[in-house]
Amino acid sequence: GTIHGADTVPAPKPSPEGLLQCARELGLEDDLSNMIYVGDAVGDGRAARAAGMVSVGVLWGSNSEEKLRSADTFDYIVGSVDEL
């Protein structure tokens, strides 16, 4: 596996660079459209979309459902771990 934070990638979210760096390190850079990125903030959805990944927003994080839906940055929004 690989783990990175804003201080260990070329640019923080909403830039896709951190997600792309992780994909490269895992040897998955040629299969981005089959990757899923799960996040709780608008920037997470923007980064995933810019990277060409499927984006899933979760409602148990830092933002309201209204904010996540109105931003239109997630392919899916779920309200529980079971829905994932």
Image: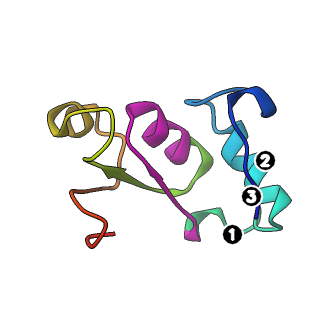
In front here: 44 or 50? 44
Pointers 3 and 2 in contact (CB under 8 A)?
Answer: yes
Tell me the SS state at disc 3: helix
Write the residue at 46% across / 31% down: 43
| Type of amino acid at the residue the image marks with label 1 | Asp
The numbered dot on residue 21 is 2
Cβ–Cβ under 8 Å for marks 3 and 1: yes
* Mark 3 Cα shell of 10 Å, populated few (<14), some (14-19), many (≥20): some
Q: Secondary structure at mark 2?
A: helix
Please say if 83 is above or below 53: below
Amino acid type at circle 3 is Ala
Quadrant of image for the C terminus: bottom left
Q: Which residue is mark 1?
A: 31
Query: Is residue 18 toward the left or the right of residue 77 in the image?
Result: right
C-alpha span from label 3 to label 1: 9 Å
Magenta span of residues? 34-49
Provide residue 34's location: percent of width, then percent of height. 57, 71
Give the CA separation, mark 3 to mark 2: 5 Å
Q: Position of residue 30 (x, y in %)?
A: 76, 66
> Label 3: which residue?
23
